[in-house]
Amino acid sequence: MDDLQLIDNSEAKQYEIHVDGLVPRIEYIKAKDKIYLTHTEVPRGLEGKGIGTSLVKAVLEDIEKKDLTLVPMCPFVAMYIKRHPEWKKLVLKGINIA
């Protein structure tokens, strides 16, 4: 996964990577300095290979680099942050990751 390039496809409002002709993605909404991650989708042929997890990590690194505040609306992203609490620093204050 480390050799795959994360693409911020702002026209489609999604982060994406290209794997074997498939496009795992995380859809988002940006508003000023906030980014709402709304939906993560990994094509069926790539499920169970850790690609979704790697994609979330790469997206969080990009959000941190761009100094955005994260609002994780997608349950998959929220679960990742719960398992990796070092990323809670990006989350909008007052949002509880259950």
Image (cartoon, grey):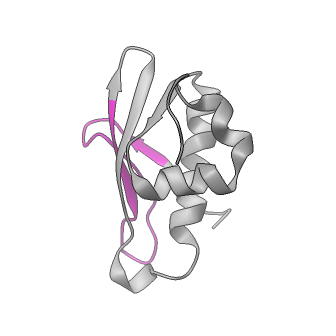
Residue 86 visible? The answer is yes
Residue 73 point in image, percent of width and height: 38, 43
As drawn, the residue found furthest toward the right would be: 86
Vertical placement of residue 51 versus 54, above or below? below
Please check the rendered image and state whether residue 14 is part of the magenta-colored stretch, yes or no: yes
Vertical placement of residue 63 versus 31, above or below? below
Q: What residue appears at the point 50 percent right and 65 percent down from the top-left corner?
A: 52
Q: What residue appears at the point 45 percent right and 80 percent down from the top-left corner?
A: 47
Q: Nearer the viewer, residue 97 or 55?
A: 97
Residue 62 point in image, percent of width and height: 58, 37
Q: Nearer the viewer, residue 98 or 8?
A: 98
Q: Is residue 96 left or right of residue 86?
A: left
Please check the rendered image and state whether residue 71 is part of the magenta-colored stretch, yes or no: no
Residue 12, quarter of picture: top left
Residue 11, quarter of picture: top left
Residue 67, quarter of picture: top right
Vertical placement of residue 84 versus 96, above or below? below
Vertical placement of residue 68 versus 79, above or below? above
Residue 96 point in image, percent of width and height: 52, 37
Q: Is residue 3 left or right of residue 37?
A: right
Residue 57 visible? The answer is no
Q: What residue appears at the point 61 percent right and 49 percent down from the top-left corner?
A: 81
Residue 83 point in image, percent of width and height: 67, 57
Q: Please provide the residue range marked out in magenta.
A: 7-29
Quadrant of the image for the N terminus? Answer: bottom right
